[in-house]
Image: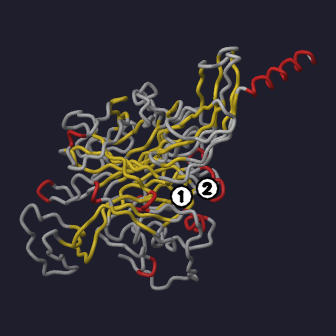
Amino acid sequence: MPVLSAIVWVMITFGSLSGELLHPSDFEYLGAFRLPDEGDYGWNWSGFAATYYPGGDLDGPADGFPGSLFALGHNQLQLVSEISIPVPVISPLKNLDDLNAATTLQPFSDITGGMFGYLEIPQAGLAYLPAQGAQASGKLHFCWSQHFQEFVPTHGWSELDLSSPQPAGPWRLDGYTPYAAADYLFDIPAEWASANTPGQRLATGRFREGFWSGLGPALFAYGPWNEGNPPPSGATLTQVTPLLLYGIQQPGIPEIAVDDSMKMRTFNPDDEWSGGAWVTAGEKSAVAFVGTKGMGSWWYGFLDGTVWPDEPPYPPVPRWPYDGRGYWSDSVKTQILLFDPEELGAVARGEQPTWAPQPYDSLDIDAVMFDAERDPYREKYSLVGAACFDRQRGILYVLEHRADGDQCLVHAWRINSPLSSMTLSIELLTPALARLSWSAVLGATHYDLYRSGSAQFDIAGVPWQTVAAPDTSLQFSDGIGDPAISFFFRARARSGAEESVSSNTVGEHEFSLNERLDRGRVAHD
């Protein structure tokens, strides 16, 4: 690996630049679900790319898990399918029969139109974004790369209709090697992008095992719609902002130049950071990488402990299944690694070098995985793959490789934050029909509505009505228009056992005020 003999940068040591960070205690495990059974070449050996689509499965059940997932199927075919999201289930005994299964919404399709050809040990990423710039529709953004590669185009987009994807691309990221820029892919929150990477709402990067992509996961912000709608095939995207790179990209050299002073503190060449998501919950946030974490000592050679030297004499190659040469370590665990978005913002603004940010926390997830062990006899070395995030409901999805036979499982966590209060309003639709409406609360799964005959009442007991998010209104006729009855209403947002503070009180006394205002408008007109 190339080593820098001198680094011209004054290193500044930062603590956390933000007091509103997510920590493992904010991650509530919800359970797992199975993928559809599509045969040997469907979801077997899959899970390397996925994205959440909020507009998917519109006719699905109101079970708190709306939307859909677009995900990559068998790793040799590189086809994309859209699936529903069933309710995740926690199985204490990790019994696959306890889990619900997703259904197919759109069958497998080549969303690239064959633009990349055959890829040796492919890597891929998917990310949905609503229409940006001059786009007329939301897009399924993608990237594809392979194990050994020069500076070639890797990124593109397609339509969401898998029967007519109309792919655009591929494009290359100006000056950056696919070894660091083309694997995981996810959206950047609009507010953060506006302040730090204007017009660039996509984050893309890669961690290539060993040292070739730098000494930790890499990440870049870009927005292809800024350079054409779409940019021409083969175009070089010049508007790219580095957010994280543990090394230096030298012009024309695919391998990132590195030095120990630029490494991630927990770096191990046997790491595999295979997915990422920009997770948020209220005012809290984190940039999360998921993957298989190498632990303890590492070596280059064979899984049985045989070290392969830089120069001969070389040792005998072990027998199968230990004959695969690569980077290995004493043990591995599955993990979610958390970075401070404000430290990445400082990199984007040029205030820190790209290798300055460090993970501030991590979450070990072996305990909920169904099969968190490497198995050379099954050629199972990668334990988890892609990640994606439902930002409206704060749900993180992570795909576990080959935990259901050769198929993936999908695990889900809710990212919790204090629920904000609701603002409640009421209006009379007809003399006998009223509607309660309220402001949406981020992270809420349900809204509990209470009513009383007294204007001064405390919320207690069983709710009068419960409405599942994302609905934010309720029409009712019970008791409306009866002059002998007056009702008053309050509400709370709820997520699991967590509840918001109580809303304001509204009641039928507001109807007479509205009627007087309406009569005044008629007289004035």
Q: Using residue 119 as the reference point, say whether residue 513 is left or right of it.
A: right
Residue at x 67% of width, y 16% of height: 482
**Labelled pair 1, 2 in contact (Cβ < 8 Å):** yes
Apparent side of residue 83 relative to residue 41 in the rendered image (left or right): right
Give percent across and percent down for residue 324. Answer: 16, 63
Residue under circle 2? 192
Amino acid type, mark 2:
Trp
Q: Is residue 195 left or right of residue 44?
A: right
Instruction: Give the foreground label among 1 and 2.
Output: 1
- How many neighbours does mark 1 have within 10 angstroms: few (below 14), some (14-19), or many (20 or more)? many
Q: Residue at position x 50%, y 54% from top?
A: 278
The one nearer the camera, 454 or 70, is: 454
Front residue of 369/319: it is 369
Distance (Cα) linking label 1 and label 2: 10 Å
Callout 2: 10 Å neighbours few (<14), some, many (20+)? some
SS of the residue under disc 2 = helix
Name which quarter of the figure residue 211 lies in: bottom left
| Amino acid marked by disc 1 | Ser
For disc 1, the marked residue is: 285
In this view, 254 is above or below 446: below
Q: Residue furthest bottom?
A: 5
Query: At x 55% / y 42%, what residue is drawn?
Result: 493
Residue occupying image coordinates x 38% and y 63%: 363
Is 95 in front, or is 463? 463
- In percent of width and height, residue 433 lies at 64, 17
Image quarter hosting the N terminus: bottom left
Q: Earlier in the sequence, mark 1 or mark 2?
A: 2
